[in-house]
Image: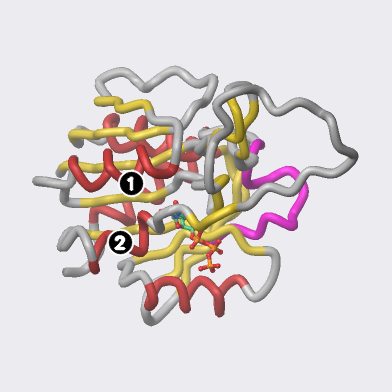
Amino acid sequence: MKFLITAGPTREPIDPVRYLTNRSSGRMGYALAGAARHDGHEVLLISGPTTLDVPPGVDFIPVETAQQMYEAVRDMLRGVDVAILCAAVADYRPVSCADQKIKKNADTLVLELERTPDILGSMRSEFGFTGKLIGFAAETQNIIEYGRDKLQRKQCDMIVANDVSQPGIGFDSRENAVVLIYPDHEEYLERDTKEHIAMQIIEHATILPS
Ligand code: CTP
């Protein structure tokens, strides 16, 4: 099967030396890419900036901004059987990026922000993607309810939801504990390394009902 996986944070420039970003190490997405490749699949990883090594045998497109990630995903969907969108995409970006470094003249600074494109939300409606679609959800409450709502709104086959209010798991850490949310049931994957969680997610992804 052919997998497309997004990972890492995006960076939305404010001026030549500053940007807005999200807390994300990219580990979950890279672990997914490694696990899918290990299982013999063809894998394309599209990632924002991280300090991680690309797993051997995985095709790689580095991006910085949400817009670049959106365009890379849109342009690379041909032949993809399973898309797993794991990136922590910035939801807002500065309306404009200053040409020169902004000097700290004033006591307060107001940045005007606008929405970035919703990549997951565009997969079916704009890109016409017909393969299996898996989204991630980071929630602090009502995990199942919010996750199932996202599953339906974004026409996903599965949502991988994690509770980011729990210390020691989720973004920026080595371990995770997630709930796989399907249209009619849930499955809990107990706390484990991101590599082990990734292997289980890939197994579930390959047997998603059509
Ligand atoms: N995502 C994306 N493009 C964005 C933002 C998020 O593809 N611009 C993807 C993430 O990779 C992840 C999922 O969407 O798979 C997270 O959902 P998102 O809609 O960002 O979650 P919330 O911020 O909780 O959104 P909402 O307010 O709609 O619940």
* Labels 2 & 1 near each other (Cβ < 8 A): yes
Report the magenta stretch's main SS.
loop
Q: Residue at x 45, y 69 (%)?
A: 181
Q: Which mark is residue 90?
A: none
Residue stretch in magenta: 161-172
118 or 59, nearer to the observer = 118
Determine which residue is flagged by label 2.
122
Q: Which residue reaches farthest right?
A: 107
Check if residue 163 falls in the magenta segment. Answer: yes
Vertical comparison of 198 with 40: above or below: below
Q: How many marks?
A: 2
Say whether residue 26 is left or right of residue 3. Answer: right
Q: Which residue reaches farthest left?
A: 79
Amino acid found under the numbered disc labelled 2: Ser
Tell me residue 58's x, y (percent): 27, 25
31 or 71, nearer to the observer = 71
Tell me residue 196's x, y (percent): 48, 40
Which corner quadrant holds the C terminus?
bottom left
Vertical comparison of 47 with 129: above or below: above
Say whether residue 156 is left or right of residue 166. Answer: left
| In the image, the residue with mark 1 has its CB under 8 Å from the nearest atom of ligand 1 | yes
| In the image, the residue with mark 2 has its CB under 8 Å from the nearest atom of ligand 1 | yes
Determine which residue is flagged by label 1.
70
Q: Residue at x 40, y 72 (%)?
A: 151
